[in-house]
Image (tube, grey):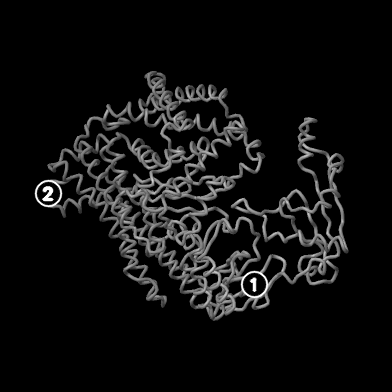
Amino acid sequence: MTSRSSLWVSLMQNNKRRLWQWCLMVLLFAVLPVLVFLILIMSINESQYLINYGSKAYDQIRQEVHRYASVFIGASGGLKPVIVTFGAALTALGGFSYINDRVKLDFYESMPQKKSSRFFVIWFNGIVMFILTYVTGMLLGFAVLTVSGYGDLYTMNEAIRDFGNITLYYLGVYHLFILSMMITGTVFAGICAFAVLSSYEAIIRLMIAAFKGIFFRYKYVLSEFMEPVVSPYGLYLKVIAEADRTNGDPSKYLIMLGVFDLAVFIVSLLVYMKRPREKAGRTLVFKWMAEPLKILMAVPAVTAAGLITAQTMNANGLLNVRNMVLIGVIILIASIIACALIQGVFELDIRQAFKKKIQWIVCAVLALMIFFGFKQDILGIDRYVPDPSEVASAVFAPEGYDGLWGGRIGADLKYMDMVDFYRENMYLTDAESICELAGLSMEKYDEAWDKVNDDPDLFYGSDESNMFSQAILLYRMKNGRLIAREISIPVKNDRAAELVDKIMSTQEFVRGFYSVEVYDADTAISDTPAMQLEARFTDGVHDRRLDKDELIELIEMYKKDMETFSYKERINLLPAGYIRYSISTQESRFYGPIQEESLVVYPCMKNCIKYINDKGYSLDGFSLYDEAEAVIITNPHYDEQNEYMKEEGLDYLPDELQERFIKSKEYSGTDLKELEAFLYPGDIGMYRWDGGKDFDVSYEVQIVYKRGGEKAKRFGDLNYYYFVKDEIPENVVNDLAL
């Protein structure tokens, strides 16, 4: 770009031509972040914090300022990556747009400077722009922090770590945009190429997930599957996620990001050196790339058309063999439209749109192969079960067992995603049992669906011997892969029950499934001098309050009982009650307890039951006869209603017809006393993952409490109890029969 050979002079000359980019980069990284950071600190209302948090106000303010610092000085949150993406695209576009302008290209190449030297000067200048403006903004942010009196809150080590991470991300986006400019001949085409390169892998992964959602019976449960791994965006997301994870080390993904940066840089340089200068102003500078690129762009679009059609049919229950012909026709039409559109854009001439008709056939065939490849699962992905000898360790997590659903509390008493919790805490080594259970479960589940010809109404209405419960399986393979599935366990199958019992009775499972709730709970409770603790032993209706020492002692008993966990023994038992406790702070009253747990106590848990009985906290002393005036039991006869609707061809039953099926009776006095042994509060049963004792929901049982009594004040006039399945008194069955 200049006749002088000095790199410094070349840089200075290049800088003079890029002043507008310098101004924008200074604005992006040195002015706006510092200005917003200063405004946020100045807007902190200390008096309002004192009102809300009392003696904890100063700590809360410092926590808030640290959060601001991590965003505006460091790179936490989603704001900084967005700004860096824009900055990287800006410097790449400003530096290399000249190669797509014939006049500028002739001017620059007429200068006595090597082609490679020109590339390195422009490339290096873009990096200098980012580093100088970013570091300036970072130092100004520290100055604001110090002047505000919070200089000790955010360390230089944290800032340097974030700077290193975000610089690797910047280079990834920067090089990707440079490559986009190198393979195209106009600025607009370069921007389009950057958009395609940035989103292509994400779109493919999204389509794969959609195909699996429609055609696969066993779904993936790891969100990381959706994140691109051959792009700066996905890799940086993994760096952030790993850094946020407890004791996470993101170095693996930082190395991958560095390798990506280097690879794209080398490809960009090679393309630049081979780029024919006379092609400036064309869509592509390498003509041989046109056909493969057209197909690579058209196939996902055509496949998406078939996928959307299949999703629409699936949502309306129309996805069957006969309608597969329609999907084939849609794919063929989409292939013609997509190829014509892409051809017109590539040639910059709409008259050329319907040439290259062979592309229509190629794209349609490839799209059909992808579509039906997923439908038939020709690669065996859906039902894959690894060889036990290839598994290093595994996770088996029954979803909802003992009422444990959703996210969990981690070792630092912070909320964790359910799958992340199991992945970090459970390491089962009995791979043979887990793999056998997975294979057996898939076999039985497929058989059950095949019997009803994939009809959901028939499947979910099938007999109880086909009962399936969901479980998460993770295989940590010896080669480093992590395979995750959610499968359905046939809990009524004898062999499946034996395998589940063998797996869940191990200490590896107990410590992994209940890790923090049980094994660290007493530590958390011990460290609560400034926190509010509420604890009780309850069945959902009757409570026995526990103080702090009693709760810690009872959890110790619970831990002893968990060491002799017996899945089979629990199947035939209803819980005796629950140990429920919550830990709150003054400030957490605005968003709920920081820890809230419910531990199930079964009659077979001898240490817990003995402790509860010795304290006089047993729930057996409560009598429904003493608390209630009457029990109203109703049998709506839903099965008979549905049968009648089928026979009459009705979509629903009018109220006057429903009344013919609904039978109800009120029980009081001696009748109530005889019934109370069969009735249980709702919290004691309702959902049983193991297929054990569960409630019968076909009978509605309403408890009418005595007016003015303690239960009436707490629950109102009515509360709901339940019968256990197959344990309904004969007189009730007869009284409410049709």
Of 522 and 315, the residue lying toward us: 522
Residue depicted at 72% across the width and 54% down the height: 724
Residue labelled with disc 1:
536
Question: Nearer the observer, disc 2 or disc 1?
Answer: 1
Secondary structure type for disc 2: loop
Q: In the rendered view, would you say 32 is above or below 256?
A: below
Question: Percent position (x, y) of residue 166?
Answer: 33, 57
Query: Callout 1 environment at 10 Å: few (<14), some (14 to 19), or many (20+)?
Result: many
343 over 724 or under it: above or below: above
Of helix, strand and loop, which one carries label 1? strand
**Residue 95, percent across and down?**
27, 46
The residue carrying pointer 2 sits among few (fewer than 14), some (14 to 19) or many (20 or more) residues within 10 Å by Cα, namely: few
Compared across the picture, whether 566 is left or right of 544 comes to left
Residue 286 visible from this viewpoint: yes
In the image, 484 versus 550, the foreground residue is 550
The amino acid pointed to by label 1 is Arg
- Cα separation, mark 2 vs mark 1, equals 82 Å
**Residue 598 seen in render:** no
Residue at image mark 2? 4
Residue for point 40% across, 26% down: 366
Comparing 502 with 174, the one in front is 502
Q: Return the x and y of residue 182 as percentages of the image width and height.
A: 27, 38
Q: Quadrant of residue 311?
A: top right
| Left or right of residue 410, residue 669 in this image | right
Task: Give residue 273's position: percent from left, percent from top.
Answer: 19, 38
Q: Tag 2: residue type?
A: Arg
Mark nearer the N terminus (2 vs 1) = 2
